């Protein structure tokens, strides 16, 4: 791929990745806001005791319809950019909690990237067929330090699947040390960092740029899913806020002019409920698989880096990775060895 085509591709990925979730949000939020404005308008007319005049306002909207469309597109891009660049940690943790709460086979715990530090637990294993983790325990694991990308038990996850060559690249390990030799060789937990994956991506851009297209696409898919998830969450909050404001307007009208008979006063809760429900339904499938997608991204980056280093002779890709003991100052290495 030429540099020019790579730049165009990255621009399109970033541009569409921001515009699509923003347009998704604006297209559902605009009817809510318009309905609220209509309700406020009707409320002012009802309190004043005069009929609402829509003709002049509709004429103004028709006159500036191009400007309104452009404003909505710009707003969609700006909001989409905010959603697109938010950390996927929140939907990832919710997805991990969803998976942990539905795990019913204790033998599968050692195959997870997020594991309790003590397993099996001192209290014993749960009955067969029952959830392995309680809702509280699943929430604690999914939101704890071990759930931070790229996850506490990534090495154990790779080993359990026979990916030993990739497990050797991971420098942190949270499993308890069994022998003094293992304890001496154990790397500190705080060496786990998302910089580990980011550094590999940067090096692959130089050493194997022809393989980075798939990596960019995988990351774009995750960003798209997380940005849509955040857009749905914002829609749910907007639905609640619009319903609350409409309720206050309704109370004011009822107090000043009696119960209103216009249908716009009663349509907002139904419209807000539909938007809230639609956002929840969109979030459900994202919650089920975004955690798996992030794990897949890690494995793909590790395998690409290992293949570039071992089969293409580009050993520099794997030198001095974050978390490597050779990167530690001599005093820290000595402290780590004596720990």
Image: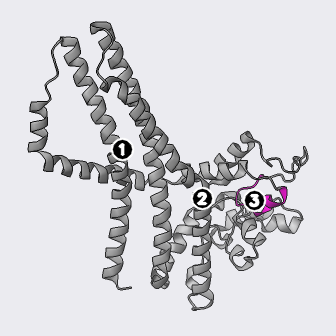
> Could you tell which of marks 2 and 1 lies nearer the N-terminus?
1
Q: Mark 3 points at which residue?
A: 174
Residue 274: x and y in percent read 44, 38
Query: Which residue is the site of mark 2?
Result: 289
Q: Which residues fall within the magenta stretch? A: 106-116
Near-viewer residue (22 or 182): 22
Tell us which disc is closer to us: 3 or 1: 1
For the N terminus, the image quarter is bottom left
Real-space Cα separation, disc 2 to disc 1, in angstroms: 24 Å
User: Height in image: 183 above or below 126?
Assistant: below
Q: Where is residue 22 in the image (x, y as percent from the top left)?
A: 35, 52
Residue 5 within the segment the image draws in magenta: no
Q: In which quarter of the image is residue 37?
A: top left
* Residue 176 visible (yes or no): yes
Q: Is residue 153 left or right of residue 267?
A: right
- Reply above or below: 154 against 23: below
Q: Position of residue 98 (x, y in %)?
A: 66, 49
* Tag 2 and tag 1, C-beta contact below 8 Å: no
Secondary structure of the residue carrying numbered label 3: loop
Image quarter where the C terminus lies is bottom right
Residue density around tag 1, few if under 14, some if 14–19, many if 20 or more, within 10 Å? some
Task: Identify the disc placed on residue 231.
Answer: none
Label 3, residues with CA under 10 Å away: few <14, some 14-19, many ≥20: many
Q: Circle 1 sits in a helix, a strand or a loop, which is it?
A: helix
Residue 145 visible, this angle: no
The quarter of the picture where residue 313 lies is bottom right
Residue under numbered circle 1? 28
- Coloring applied to the structure: one colour
**Residue shown at 91%/47% (left/top)?**
124
């Amino acid at each position: 791929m030429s540099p020019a085509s790579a730049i165009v591709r990255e621009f399109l990925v970033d541009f569409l990745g921001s515009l699509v979730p923003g347009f998704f949000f604006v297209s559902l939020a605009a009817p809510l806001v318009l309905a609220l404005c209509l309700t406020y308008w009707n409320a002012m007319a009802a309190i004043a005791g005069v009929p609402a005049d829509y003709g002049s306002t509709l004429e103004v909207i028709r006159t500036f319809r191009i400007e309104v469309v452009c404003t909505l597109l710009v707003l969609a891009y700006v909001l989409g950019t905010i959603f697109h660049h938010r950390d996927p940690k929140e939907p990832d943790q919710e997805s991990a909690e969803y998976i942990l709460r539905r795990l019913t086979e204790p033998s599968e715990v050692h195959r997870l990237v997020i594991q309790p530090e003590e397993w099996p637990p001192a209290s014993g294993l749960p009955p067969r067929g029952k959830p392995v983790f309680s809702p509280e325990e699943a929430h604690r694991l999914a939101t704890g330090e071990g759930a931070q990308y790229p996850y506490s038990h990534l090495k154990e996850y790779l080993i359990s699947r026979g990916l030993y060559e990739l497990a050797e690249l991971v420098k942190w390990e949270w499993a308890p040390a069994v022998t003094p030799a293992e304890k001496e060789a154990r790397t500190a937990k705080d060496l786990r960092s998302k910089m580990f994956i980011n550094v590999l991506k940067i090096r692959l851009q130089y050493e194997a740029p022809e393989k980075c297209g798939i990596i960019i696409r995988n990351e774009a898919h995750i960003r798209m899913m997380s940005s849509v998830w955040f857009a749905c969450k914002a829609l749910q909050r907007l639905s609640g806020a619009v319903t609350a404001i409409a309720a206050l307007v309704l109370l004011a009208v009822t107090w000043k002019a009696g119960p209103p008979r216009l249908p716009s006063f009663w349509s907002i809760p139904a419209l807000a409920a539909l938007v809230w429900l639609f956002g929840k339904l969109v979030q459900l499938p994202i919650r089920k698989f975004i955690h798996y997608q992030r794990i897949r991204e890690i494995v793909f980056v590790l395998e690409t880096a290992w293949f570039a280093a071992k089969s293409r002779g580009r050993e520099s890709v794997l030198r001095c990775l974050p978390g490597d003991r050779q990167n530690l100052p001599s005093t820290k290495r000595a402290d780590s060895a004596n720990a």
